[in-house]
Structure formats: C-alpha cells, structure tokens
Amino acid sequence: MPRLLLVSSSRVHPTSFLEHCRDAITEHFSGCAEVAFIPYALADHDHYESIVQAAFAPIGIPIRSIHHAANPVSAIESAQGIFTGGGNTFRLLKTLYDLKLMKRLRDQVQRADIPYMGSSAGTNLAGPTIRTTNDMPIVEPPSFEALNLVPFQINPHYQDADPDSTHQGETRAQRLEEYLEENESPVVAIREGSWLQVENGCCQLCGTTGMVLFRRGQPAQEMGPSADLSFLMD
C-alpha cells in the first residue's frame, strides 16, 4: 500500500513555502537520509530545487533534484523518499512520460514502500488522471493517465464561489460537475491549507480548511478537517 502525503498547495498565506505542513512532512519522511525531488512542473529546475531545499532545511532532510541525474530512472529507483512539486500539471506529466519515468515512479511508490509527497501538480499526479487539474494545457502529454495511487480524482487549490462576485463564468464547482457528466471517478476538492495522508489503505484529511467531495449523481458534500476518507479507497 502506498504511503502518500498529498498537499493542496505549497504556499498558504501568511506562511512560507511548505511551512503550514512542515510537521506532517517531518513525520512522513522520517528515516529518510535524502529525498528525491521531481521538479518538472516548472521550467527552472535549479531554482525550484533551491526553494525546496530551503523549505526542507529546518527538517534536516537533504533534497536532491533528479534533473541532475544522468539516469533519472536510476535516481527514482534509489530514492528513499520522493517529492513532486507543483507548477503546470501538463508539463509535469509530459516530461515524466518523455523520460519513461511513469511506470518506475508508480512501482517505487506502490511496491517498494517509498513515501511519496505531492503538492498541487504533484498531488494531481497521484490520481487516476489529471483531468481535474486547474492548469492550462501548455504542452500535450501522450496521455492524461497519471499514477493511479488513489482511486479518486483530486482538485487542489479548491476555491468556493464568492457570493459577492459579479463574475458570471463557471465556478470551480460547476467545472467539476462537468467532469462528472463524462466520468465516474469521484473528485476530492481540497482547499489550500489542507492535505491528504494515505497509509495502510486508509485516507485521512488533515489541515485546517476542509474539502468538498463531488460524486456523480449526488450533491456536493462538505467535509471538515480530520475527515476519514477511507471509504473512497475501496
């Protein structure tokens, strides 16, 4: 069973990068001498690595981005822990397919018991597909199929409709309902400030802001912090 920490967003006002979930990160990667970082959701890999290294420094866990590796597959295979950062989900997925990393990454997390953390795009990657990302398709991956580490779709950065707004376009909830008109998989829409912890086949909502569960043919269901989502793992 995979061990997952799936964060809605790396940045939550007014804290610094990943500060709001630092305790959860510390526990998740306990025992790891180093964590392999997957930076492909952003274009500047060196700069992204430096940001993540600074965020992990208070935890005392070194970060090494796999873009330095002559063989990224070997870097994944030798990793003690893996963190996939946010950015553009389409760019992230395309790069992973181009480098032939998808199957190896899935195998390492599912079979080798390597703790995996995702944030934003890296969290989208954990679901069956990336069809519920908020990002623009700036590149075209060969498939929308993702790692399928959890059997439900994820929508990070979920925002509730503003009743005082004059905007008349579709709300995030309406967009996710459109997804369910064409697809069966439920959608876990996580607000910024919350994350999912998956271990031993159980799934727990953590953080402070809650989430909304969207299921086909059912009303959207508000779920507060500490909700048990293990029923979605069946």
Image (spheres, helix red, strand yellow):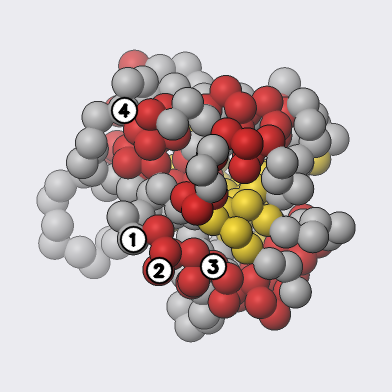
Whether tag 3 and tag 1 are in contact, CB under 8 A, the answer is no
- Give the alpha-carbon distance from disc 3 to disc 1, as whole Å: 13 Å
- Give the alpha-carbon distance from disc 2 to disc 4, as whole Å: 24 Å
Vertical placement of residue 85 versus 11, above or below: above
Residue at x-position 70% and y-position 45%: 79
| Along the line of sight, the residue nearer the viewer: 77 or 9 | 77
Q: Which of marks 3 and 2 is nearer the N terminus?
A: 2
Provide the secondary structure element on which disc 2 rests: helix
Vertical placement of residue 227 versus 59, above or below: above
Type of the residue with mark 2? His
Residue at x-position 31% and y-position 28%: 141
- Pair 2/4: label in front: 2
**For mark 1, what is the residue?**
44
Instruction: Tell me the crowding category of disc 2: few under 14, some 14 to 19, or many 20 or more residues within 10 angstroms, Cα based.
Output: few
Provide the secondary structure element on which disc 4 rests: loop
Q: Mark number for residue 52?
A: 3
Q: Earlier in the sequence, mark 3 or mark 1?
A: 1
State left or right for residue 151 relative to residue 198. left
Residue at x-position 29% and y-position 62%: 162
Vertical placement of residue 233 versus 192, above or below: above
**For mark 2, what is the residue?**
47
- Give the alpha-carbon distance from disc 4 to disc 1, as whole Å: 19 Å
Q: Where residue 73 sits in the image (x, y, percent)? A: 57, 34
Q: Mark number for residue 9?
A: none
| Along the line of sight, the residue nearer the viewer: 169 or 137 | 137
- Give the alpha-carbon distance from disc 3 to disc 2, as whole Å: 9 Å
Type of the residue with mark 3? Val
Instruction: Tell me the crowding category of disc 4: few under 14, some 14 to 19, or many 20 or more residues within 10 angstroms, Cα based.
Output: some
Whether tag 4 and tag 3 are in contact, CB under 8 A, the answer is no
Q: Mark number for residue 141?
A: 4
